[in-house]
């Protein structure tokens, strides 16, 4: 009896919806971080140090 090695099939299909979801989440998180940072700068600049 001979055994052959088969590579595992990818979890995502050819369209890779998982990668698309991760990329979208990273974009949304980045935009939220930039918005938060801009809000903090605006708030601190309004304090009149």
Image (cartoon, helix red, strand yellow):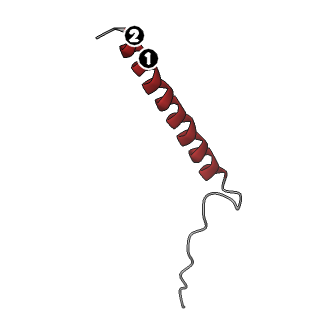
Q: Looking at the image, which residue is at 39% across and 10% down?
A: 46
The answer to whether the residues at label 1 and label 2 have Cβ atoms under 8 Å apart is yes
Q: Looking at the image, which residue is at 58% across and 47% down?
A: 23
**Residue 3 x, y percent position in the rendering:** 53, 86
Q: What residue would you read off at disc 2?
A: 46
**Residue 45 x, y percent position in the rendering:** 38, 15
**Residue 37 x, y percent position in the rendering:** 43, 26
| Relative vertical location of residue 19 with respect to residue 48 in this rendering, above or below | below
| Relative vertical location of residue 45 with respect to residue 3 in this rendering, above or below | above
Q: Quadrant of residue 21?
A: top right
Q: Quadrant of residue 4?
A: bottom right
Callout 1 secondary element: helix
Q: What residue would you read off at disc 1?
A: 42
Residue 7 numbered mark, or none? none
Image side of residue 11 versus residue 29, left or right: right
Dot 2 alpha-carbon crowd within 10 angstroms: few under 14, some 14 to 19, many 20 or more: few
**Residue at the front extreme?**
48
Q: Looking at the image, which residue is at 56% across and 40% down?
A: 27
């Amino acid at each position: 009896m001979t055994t052959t090695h088969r590579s595992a099939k990818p979890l995502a299909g050819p369209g890779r919806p998982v990668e698309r979801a991760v990329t979208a989440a990273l974009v949304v998180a980045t935009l939220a971080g930039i918005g938060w940072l801009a809000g903090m700068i605006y708030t601190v600049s309004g304090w009149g140090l």
